[in-house]
Image (spheres, rainbow, N blue to C red):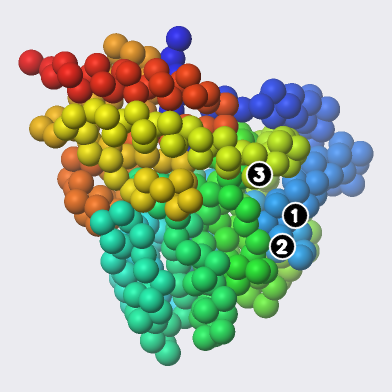
């Protein structure tokens, strides 16, 4: 039997109620939401509305209409960056970002946006003072991930957001690794734009994600097309969320996302976080005993989210991951994890690391088994 430890890529398994919500929506509300006034279209529309309200409540958004759905975090991030930044703008980001942020910013750089990257430290932490220093009067936007998908490092967004607000700089958070595990409050954290996937910590199906846009910010859409209303016009609707939601939404997936959020709310985010921190502590304590093994990230449960990276001296992470899978049934991820800058920051470029990312459904026994498997692989180099 395999032990899935790749929840930073996508969470697995999902709660049973997520499966049930997807199937029930496909079966009983399978019409197109927002298109047509018949009862099935209205039922599909209700599913979307309920999910929007569940997301808004989860992130402390005062108005659910400011939440637009996307098919993943990448699409939400692209919508925010291409919709907000203009040639001549200056954006401050960090060396700990996922390619979902780095690549759109690179493309925008080629269109005349200035991109400044603030260096993280060896544990992946970006000092808020360094970030503040990098912001000049011309800075339009600060964008960073709340929690690194490579090192699990948590950034101090609750300090950075209010500072940006005070200085008239928009603040955008990539919550791909934190939504569903850490409490997010866009109002108190001074967040103007927040992108998250539905399929990781929120326990929803793949093909779901969202972007929160603060009232007062109107993004240029990334995608144009039908929205079910105002069909006489060849312009996109001005109002959110339709403005950013051209084309048919993933109604069954979003029903699953609402079920995932309801599950988390019932369990309590604090309990979810406490359990994952306990798993991480067990993992760190065990892996620390293995000779020649290097651990990365803060390694302090207070400042460390779900993902834990390691490498073994003289060994290729790809080989370690392969042996863990084939000989021990431990499913990890190896390499650069779509974040080459983060590996340059912590000194693991270009080979990358082995990443273990437990989820809410893993147990302490899973962690002990994983540690003994890593020890066996470490003590048994391939010829
Ligand atoms: C920090 C971070 N940002 C963005 C993404 C992209 O998420 P998605 O796969 O939903 O597009 C990921 C995915 O691993 C991530 O870890």
Location of residue 105 in the rendering, given as x and y in whole percent from the top left corner: 37, 65
Q: Secondary structure at mark 1?
A: helix
Mark 2 CB lies closer than 8 A to ligand 1: no
Vertical placement of residue 147 versus 313, above or below: below
Callout 2: SS:
loop
Instruction: Judge whether residue 333 can be spotted in this image.
Output: no
Mark 3 closeness class: few <14, some 14–19, many ≥20 residues within 10 Å: some
Return the residue at label 2: 61
Between the residue at mark 2 and the residue at mark 1, the CA separation in whole angstroms equals 6 Å
Q: Residue at x 30, y 13 (%)?
A: 326
* Location of residue 193 in the rendering, given as x and y in whole percent from the top left corner: 57, 66
Left or right: 150, with 171 as reference point: left
Closer mark to the observer between disc 1 and disc 3: 3
Residue at x 44%, y 36% (from the top left corner): 280
Identify the mark nearer the N-term, 2 or 3: 2
Secondary structure beneath label 3: helix
Tag 2 and tag 1, C-beta contact below 8 Å: yes
Is 130 left, or right, of 378 in this rendering? right
* Image quadrant where one finds the C terminus: top left
Q: Quadrant of the N terminus?
A: top left
Residue 136 - label: none
Residue drawn at (40%, 52%) of the image: 153
* Residue beneath disc 3: 269
Height in image: 217 above or below 122?
Answer: below
Numbered disc in front, either 2 or 3:
3
Q: Residue furthest left?
A: 383
Where is mark 1, residue-wise? 57
Residue 338: give x, y in percent of width and height: 33, 46
Q: Which residue is outermost to the bottom?
A: 137
Residue 98 is situated, as x and y percent measured from the top left of the image, at 38, 52
Residue 283 shows in the view: yes
């Amino acid at each position: 039997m395999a032990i899935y430890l790749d929840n930073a890529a996508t969470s697995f398994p999902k709660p049973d109620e997520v499966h049930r919500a997807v199937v029930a929506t496909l079966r009983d509300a399978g019409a197109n939401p927002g298109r047509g006034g018949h009862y099935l279209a209205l039922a599909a529309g209700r599913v979307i509305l309920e999910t929007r309200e569940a997301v808004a409540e989860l992130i402390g958004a005062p108005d659910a209409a400011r939440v637009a759905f996307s098919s993943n975090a990448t699409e939400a991030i692209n919508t925010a960056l291409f919709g907000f930044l203009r040639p001549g703008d200056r954006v401050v980001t960090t060396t700990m970002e996922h390619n979902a942020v780095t690549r759109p910013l690179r493309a925008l750089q080629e269109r005349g946006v200035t991109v400044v990257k603030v260096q993280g430290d060896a544990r992946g932490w970006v000092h808020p003072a360094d970030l503040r220093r990098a912001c000049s009067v011309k800075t339009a936007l600060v964008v960073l991930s709340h929690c690194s998908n490579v090192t699990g490092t948590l950034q101090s967004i609750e300090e950075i957001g209010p500072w940006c607000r005070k200085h008239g700089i928009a603040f955008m958070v990539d919550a791909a690794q934190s939504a569903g595990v850490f409490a997010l409050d866009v109002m108190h954290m001074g967040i103007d734009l927040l992108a998250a996937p539905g399929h990781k910590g929120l326990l929803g199906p793949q093909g779901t994600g969202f972007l929160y846009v603060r009232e007062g910010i109107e993004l240029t859409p990334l995608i144009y097309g039908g929205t079910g209303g105002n069909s006489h016009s060849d312009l996109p609707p001005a109002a959110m969320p339709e403005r950013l939601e051209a084309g048919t939404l993933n109604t069954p997936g979003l029903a699953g996302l609402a079920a995932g959020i309801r599950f988390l709310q019932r369990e309590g985010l604090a309990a979810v976080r406490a359990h994952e921190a306990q798993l991480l502590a067990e993992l760190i304590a065990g892996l620390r005993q293995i000779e020649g093994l290097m651990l990365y990230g803060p390694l302090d449960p207070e400042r460390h989210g779900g993902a834990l990276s390691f490498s073994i001296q003289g060994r290729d992470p790809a080989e370690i991951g392969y042996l863990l899978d084939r000989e021990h049934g431990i499913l990890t991820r190896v390499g650069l994890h779509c974040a080459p800058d983060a590996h340059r920051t912590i000194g693991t470029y270009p080979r990358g690391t082995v990443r273990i990312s437990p989820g809410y459904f893993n147990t302490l026994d899973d962690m002990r088994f994983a540690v003994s498997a890593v020890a066996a692989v470490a003590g048994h180099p391939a010829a």
